[in-house]
Amino acid sequence: MKKTVIFLLSFVILISCPAQCLAAVDVKNEKIKAKSSILMCMDTKEVIKESNAYEHLSPASVTKIMSILLVLEAIENGQIKLDDMVSADENAVSMGGSQIWLEVGEMMSVNDLLKAVIISSANDACVLLGEYVSGSADAFVEKMNERVQELGLQNTHFENCTGLDDSVTNHYSCAYDLAVIACEVMKYDLVKKYTTVWLDSLRDGKTELNNTNKLINKYNGITGLKTGTTSNAGFCLCATAQRDGLNLVSVVLGAQTSEDRFNLSTQLLDYGFANYKLADIKIDKKKITPVKIKSGVEKSIIPVIDNSGSFLLKKNTGELNYKYVIKKSVKAPVIKGDILGEIIVSDEEKELASIPLKADKTVRIVTFSKIFRILVNNI
């Protein structure tokens, strides 16, 4: 009798629940499909989560994060200025897809062109900026591929600066490489001026700019960055966000729908913020002892930390322990950057990181002539 009552009550609850309620459960449990994805800590470039992150795929307009990086670097080194006026040419004007409808001979500032690329993914503005930085669109693409090599990326090659892929044959990237490029882009405060803008305008309000990244208005801590969509690439998104000092980047390539790319990016970022934290490196400088240099022009050298700052930890990590392992002596010459020891960071269960201690200068080997000069000076 008791089982019968429970069954009847369950049946009543089931039929009284609206269809939307059941659909929400199904959607929540549904695995979102995409060809490739990754979640990376921008502060340390550590991969937190990835799926097929190194496959060569069309990145669509996510390509533009490399274009944006080169423009930002050109501004930083003084090659171009934000208030420079650029004249639109036929090549830039001929671009299809997303654009701000530049006309041949129209003058627009670098600032407005960059804003159009970042907010609205304008292909014509992107090509015009590339031409202005490097002299021609082809030269700019060469520079993009050179920068790829400088960053040590092995799975990226660009044929254009826009991501339009209807006529390309060797234009590809991967989720990992795009995440690394995004880390470089987000070092610039200037880019953040526009990556979080939802609506803006050009030409004294005559041209509206609408951000293609829907997470701008929806995700807590979102800082950018770039969407991309073509029939070949599917729906793509490189999203960056910051909470409690932790900076994350997610890349989704080849999602089946626009909503899928935003939902999967949200899931990835949520996972990172829920499970990881950025821990400050707490070094006791008193425990970094001098290293004696045999036959050197200097008697000793104090090693330094090459990259101080923070490292990525799981939130449930216990108290950290620091073990200082430093060489007592080395033979000259010592070259700047030589490893002289390490600081081993661990919790109660395992080793978490090894921080190298390096020489901050070069110490040459002592010679007879050097000894002779010292003796003469002493006399």
Image (cartoon, grey):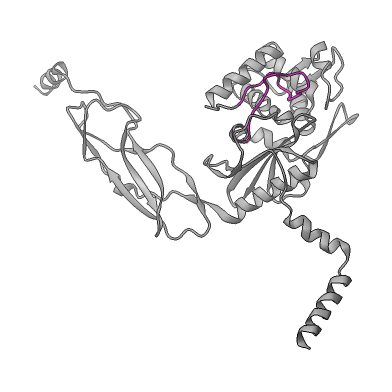
The quadrant in which the C terminus is found is top left
Q: Which residue is drawn at 70% across and 28% down?
A: 58
Look at 88% across and 71% down and name the residue there: 15
Residue 78 seen in this snapshot:
no
Q: In this view, does 68 lie to the left or right of 329?
A: right
Image quarter of residue 76: top right
The residue positioned 78% from the left and 55% from the top of the image is 27
The residue segment tinted magenta is 156-176
Q: Is 290 rendered above or below residue 143?
A: below
Tell me the quarter of the picture where residue 142 sits: top right
Residue 85 x, y percent position in the rendering: 76, 17
Q: Is residue 174 magenta?
A: yes
Front residue (pair 270, 116): 270
Q: For residue 336, what is the image quadrant?
A: top left
Q: In x, y percent, where is residue 374? A: 14, 22
Vertical arrangement, residue 27 with respect to residue 341, above or below: below
Most extreme residue toward the right is: 206
Q: Is residue 231 visible?
A: yes
Q: Position of residue 155 (x, y in %)?
A: 59, 27
The image position of residue 358, as x and y in percent, is 34, 35
Position of residue 219 in the picture relative to residue 337 (left or right): right
Toward the viewer: 43 or 236?
236
